[in-house]
Structure formats: structure tokens, C-alpha cells
Image: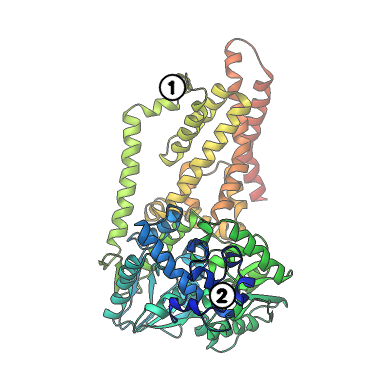
């Protein structure tokens, strides 16, 4: 997608077809000369704009620039965007919204870290670690969480790209910023071509310039995948290989590397119109890797290849080499990437490192008052909802008879309504036991357990996410005493085992505990899995017992009554057993 050569020079194509041999798009569409002369037709949005055709051309033409220009022409003819690109445009729109953007500049700042969109979402801890490491050599380093508008550029949305990226560039230059450190190859490409007087350097080059260190004790051979936008960036490619070598790794090359690297299948948003490109690219890369781990420095590439080959982001390798090589790095995926970006923004904002803080749209943030106001507003809404729920008689819906009446005539939607209602109860601090009993009465011992444990897990998860991303200050204020002070430490040491104990042994207030776990370091999915599995015994006990009550009222003692009584007794004895075990 280079802009250094005129798009019109494709008429100089000799028809040697070297580019066609390397590109399945050209194999289906024809060589650049045929397309430029109108002898063949093609959809330019089927091209990845990766530039491999340009790299192998023996006469120096730039077909990639030609196809980018064709995209602009097609979009102008259509009078708007292709509906197939709506998800990509929506992703970019969120990334440039005030909610997700953050500019933090300390006093006398002339350099900022611009990590891009993907890393803050998939690896927020990596972004924080990179920032802290860079501050050792750049003490007055700033941070910019924003989108470089690469999607709009590739989709031919020229006007929008120029206006929106121009806002980033103009603001940084006006504030005295002269250098941008990037972690994303796409951001490097955009800032290098359109950043004007801004100097651009990758964090990989910055780290490679520091004294050599080796952190990894595991000897291994790896291959490096260069993102297609980096094919002409030899200094970056060299720095990446240097950093991998410093970890004691043997870096080997694939057939397509450096200047002749392949696209991961996401270039130019082509995967939205040709979803098969992802699987094809991953299979091709896995074949060339031949079982060796692939190290890359693009989060999108790492995501594309992970299904076919062991793939490691270089920053994961740099920060946690042993875990990265063992495949133990946890990478978030949508929708949690959005929550991670909000949490990372909040962490930077609360860090106290910046004299100037700003969001998109020119909104200057001089303190965390706005964040506290938002949290207070959310808490007020939750409290108001809980109060209105109770005043409107909502508490009676936790009564089995009232629930049965409400669900009459909703044989299909009934279970869904019940699960949603059960999911709301812990968030609003309503009792869950009546709901469990109601599940047994309404749906029987089997489906009652299914619906109840689903609703309970949904509610526990919702409370966890509220605490972790929306109302942390309020939850922290509620958690006082030695028991709560030790919770985070125990979770850090034993992880899901602490969740298991607290679910099996009801020594803690259940609803507040859901919020409390949101403040700990436990991964969300570990929490969900442990909660589901270890809430299940008590859930089964009470629901099996409650399902026997209709028969008991008629003077019949069913097997469910005996089984339920035994199970409840076992559950109730767990706290005493646990205390004795802990004291021994």
C-alpha cells in the first residue's frame, strides 16, 4: 500500500507474472497490466494491499498503490462504505471515541508511547510493562491510547482518515511532542507516512539499543514473521531478531520473510469480504514454520496464526520469556478486549504521572473527578434499580408461588426469564436461596439445576465485571477487616482454589464476595469456571430437596426428599469440617 510510487505506473507492467505466482488474488484476477488496461475486472477490496507484488516486481512498479487508489475510486462511486466493512469501521470508531482514548503528558514531555488498538485490548499488562520499562530511559514519557486510523486509510475513507489522524498529529505537535514510540507496525506505517514533523521509532528498536540482556533459560529455535506493513522496514526487522536472539533463542528464517513476507490474511480488511483468507494464510505460515514457534510483532498476526501454529508476540517473549515459550501467556479476546482498554485507560489516568490528560474531542482531564463521578452515577443507578425493584414488589418475585404465576403461559420463554431474573439477584444484593428453591419447584430436579446454576453463574460473573471495571472504589470501601485484606493475597497464591473454597464453604457473604473477586488478580474465566463447578454441589442439594416439597405436602416422602436432605446436611457440615482442617 506504499505511497512512494505513483499508482499509475502499473501500465509499465511487462506481464512477467512474478507477482501472480506469489498472490492468489492476482491468480484469480489477472496481472497488474491486464487490470490497469481494463482487460480484466476485479474487486480491489479482495486485495490485502500487503505489497508482496511490489516487493517482487523486477521493473519497480507498485500494484499495491494501484489497488488502494482503486478502492478510493470504488468507494467514491458507491457514495459510501461497503456494508461488509461495518464491523471494522465500528471497531475503529470505538477506538477513536472519548471513552477509549487517553492522552497523558507529564511536564516537559517530548516523547509519547502510542501502543495502538490491539495491544491494549489483548495484552494490557504488556502495554503497562513496556511503558514502565521505557520510562527508565525516557523519564518524561507520555502515553497516547488512540487509533491511528489505519482501517479508514486502507478502506479508501480518505477524508475521514485525514481529519481524524490529523487531530492526533496536530495535538501532539502543538503540545511539543517530537517523537512517537510505537508498538504496532500499522501505527508505524501511518505515523511514518503522515506524521509530518513527528519522529517515529518502534519500541523494538528502542529496546534493542539498550544493553543486551538474556532472560530465558530455555533453548529453542524460532522463526520470525514480519508483518506485511513492515516489509521495507529493515531496521525494525533487525531489532526484532536481535531481541529474540538475546533471549537465547536460535532465530531461523522462513522462505517468506523480511521484504518478501506474507500477509496474515487481515491486510486491508480483506477478511471481512473473504473470510477464507485467514485460514489460508495460517496454513501457509504453519507449513513454512515446520513446527517451530512463530515470533511476530503484530498482535493481529499473532491472533491469525495461533490456530495453526504456536505463535508468540515478541513483547510477551520479552516480558515473560519462559511463559511465552511454554504457551502459557493469556491473551484476551473480544468482548473483553474493550473492557481491558477501559481498565488500562483508568489505570494510566489514576497513576498520577501526568500534568495534562485529555480525551478525543478536546476534553482536558485535570483530575480523576470525572471517573469518580461516573462510578458514583453507576452505583446510584444500581442502588435506585434495587430500591425500585423492591418498592414495586419485585422482591415477591423471589417467592416460588409468585414465580410460578409469572411464568404461566411462557413454557418456552419461562426458563430464559427465570435465568435472567436469577442473574440479576446477586447484582442487586437480593437473596439467591429462594430462587434456588423456586427452580426445584418450577422445573424439577434436573432442569431446575441447569437453569439455576446458569443464572447463578451469570449473576456472579456480572458482579465480578462491575467490580473490576466500573465500581472498584465502592467495592474497596465495602471490603474492610482482616478477612478481606487477605483475600487478594490468597487468590494471588492459590488462584481458583480460593474461589472453590469460598463457594463450597459459605463463610463469606455470597453477593459481596462476587464483587470482591473482581478486585483480585484472578483471570475472569478461571473465576467463572471455579464458581460454576463449586457452586454446583449446594445448588444440586437445595434444588433436589425443594423439588420434593410438593409431594411432601401431599403426605408422600419421595426419594428426592431423602437425597436432598442428605446433600443439604453434607453442605451444611462443610464449614465445621473446614474450620477443623484449617486449625489442624
According to the picture, the residue beneath numbered tag 1 turns out to be 406
Query: Where residue 378 sits in the image (x, y, percent)?
Result: 33, 48
Q: What is the count of numbered marks?
A: 2
**Nearer to me, 498 or 292:** 292
CA gap between label 1 and label 2 equals 65 Å
Mark in the foreground, 1 or 2: 2
Residue at position x 57%, y 82% from top?
A: 237
Give the vertical position of 248 relative to 77 (above or below): below
Viewer-proximal residue among 565 and 9: 9
- Looking at the image, the residue that sits furthest to the top is 554
Closer to the N terminus: mark 1 or mark 2?
A: 2
Left or right, 202 with respect to 349, comes to right
Label number found at residue 446: none
Front one among 189 and 415 = 189
> Callout 2: 10 Å neighbours few (<14), some, many (20+)?
many
The local secondary structure at tag 1 comes to helix
Toward which corner of the image does residue 448 lie, by quadrant? top right
Residue 444, image x, y percentages:
60, 23
Q: Position of residue 245 (x, y in %)?
A: 65, 83
Check disc 2 and report its element: helix, strand or loop. Answer: helix
The residue indicated by pointer 2 is 53
536 or 9, nearer to the observer: 9
Amino acid at each position: 500500500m506504499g505511497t512512494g510510487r505513483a499508482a499509475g505506473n502499473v501500465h509499465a507492467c511487462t506481464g512477467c507474472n512474478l507477482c501472480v505466482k506469489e498472490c492468489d488474488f492476482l491468480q484469480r484476477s489477472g496481472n497488474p497490466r491486464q487490470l490497469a488496461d481494463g482487460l480484466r475486472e476485479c474487486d480491489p477490496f479482495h486485495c490485502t494491499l500487503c505489497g508482496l507484488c511490489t516487493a517482487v516486481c523486477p521493473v519497480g512498479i507498485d500494484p499495491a498503490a494501484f489497488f488502494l487508489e482503486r478502492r478510493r475510486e470504488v468507494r467514491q462511486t458507491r457514495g459510501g462504505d461497503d456494508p461488509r466493512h461495518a464491523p471494522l469501521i465500528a471497531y475503529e470508531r470505538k477506538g477513536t471515541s472519548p471513552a477509549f482514548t487517553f492522552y497523558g503528558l507529564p511536564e516537559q514531555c517530548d516523547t509519547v508511547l502510542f501502543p495502538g488498538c490491539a495491544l491494549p485490548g489483548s495484552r494490557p499488562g504488556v502495554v503497562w510493562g513496556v511503558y514502565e520499562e521505557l520510562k527508565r530511559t525516557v523519564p518524561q514519557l507520555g502515553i497516547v491510547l488512540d487509533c491511528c486510523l489505519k482501517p479508514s486509510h486502507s478502506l479508501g475513507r480518505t477524508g475521514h482518515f485525514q481529519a481524524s489522524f490529523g487531530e492526533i498529529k496536530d495535538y501532539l505537535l502543538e503540545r511539543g511532542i517530537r517523537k512517537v514510540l510505537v508498538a504496532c507496525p500499522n501505527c508505524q506505517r501511518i505515523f511514518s507516512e503522515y506524521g509530518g514533523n513527528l519522529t517515529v521509532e518502534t519500541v523494538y528498536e528502542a529496546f534493542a539499543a539498550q544493553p543486551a540482556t538474556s532472560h530465558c533459560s530455555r533453548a529453542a529455535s524460532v522463526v520470525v514473521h514480519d508483518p506485511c506493513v513492515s516489509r521495507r522496514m529493515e531496521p525494525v526487522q533487525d531489532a526484532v531478531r536481535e531481541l529474540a536472539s538475546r533471549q537465547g533463542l536460535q532465530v531461523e528464517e522462513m522462505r517468506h520473510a523480511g521484504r518478501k513476507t506474507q500477509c496474515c490474511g487481515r491486510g486491508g480488511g480483506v477478511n471481512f469480504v473473504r473470510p477464507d483468507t485467514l485460514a489460508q494464510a495460517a496454513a501457509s505460515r504453519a507449513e513454512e514454520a515446520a513446527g517451530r514457534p512463530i515470533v511476530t510483532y503484530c498482535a493481529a498476526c499473532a491472533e491469525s496464526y495461533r490456530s495453526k501454529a504456536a505463535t508468540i508476540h515478541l513483547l510477551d517473549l520479552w516480558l515473560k520469556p519462559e511463559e511465552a515459550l511454554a504457551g502459557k501467556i493469556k491473551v484476551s479476546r473480544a468482548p473483553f478486549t474493550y473492557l481491558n482498554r477501559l481498565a488500562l485507560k483508568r489505570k494510566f489516568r489514576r497513576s498520577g504521572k501526568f500534568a495534562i490528560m485529555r480525551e478525543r474531542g478536546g476534553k482536558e482531564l485535570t483530575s480523576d473527578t470525572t471517573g469518580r463521578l461516573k462510578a458514583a452515577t453507576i452505583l446510584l443507578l444500581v442502588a435506585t434499580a434495587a430500591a425500585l425493584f423492591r418498592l414495586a414488589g419485585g422482591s415477591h418475585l423471589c417467592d416460588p408461588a409468585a414465580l410460578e404465576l409469572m411464568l404461566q403461559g411462557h413454557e418456552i420463554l419461562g426458563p430464559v426469564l427465570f435465568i435472567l431474573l436469577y442473574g440479576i439477584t446477586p447484582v442487586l444484593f437480593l437473596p439467591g436461596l429462594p430462587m434456588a428453591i423456586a427452580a426445584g419447584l418450577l422445573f424439577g430436579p434436573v432442569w431446575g439445576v441447569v437453569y439455576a446454576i446458569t443464572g447463578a453463574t451469570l449473576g456472579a460473573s456480572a458482579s465480578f465485571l462491575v467490580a473490576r471495571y466500573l465500581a472498584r472504589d465502592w467495592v474497596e470501601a465495602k471490603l474492610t477487616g482482616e478477612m478481606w485484606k487477605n483475600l487478594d493475597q490468597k487468590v494471588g497464591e492459590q488462584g481458583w482454589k480460593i474461589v472453590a473454597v469460598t463457594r463450597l464453604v459459605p463463610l463469606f457473604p455470597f453477593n459481596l464476595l462476587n464483587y470482591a473477586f473482581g478486585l483480585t488478580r484472578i483471570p475472569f474465566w478461571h473465576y467463572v469456571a471455579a464458581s460454576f463447578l463449586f457452586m454446583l454441589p449446594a445448588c444440586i442439594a437445595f434444588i433436589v430437596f425443594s423439588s420434593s416439597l410438593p409431594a411432601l405436602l401431599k403426605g408422600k416422602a419421595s426419594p428426592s426428599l431423602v437425597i436432598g436432605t442428605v446433600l443439604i446436611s453434607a453442605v451444611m457440615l462443610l464449614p465445621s469440617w473446614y474450620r477443623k482442617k484449617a486449625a489442624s
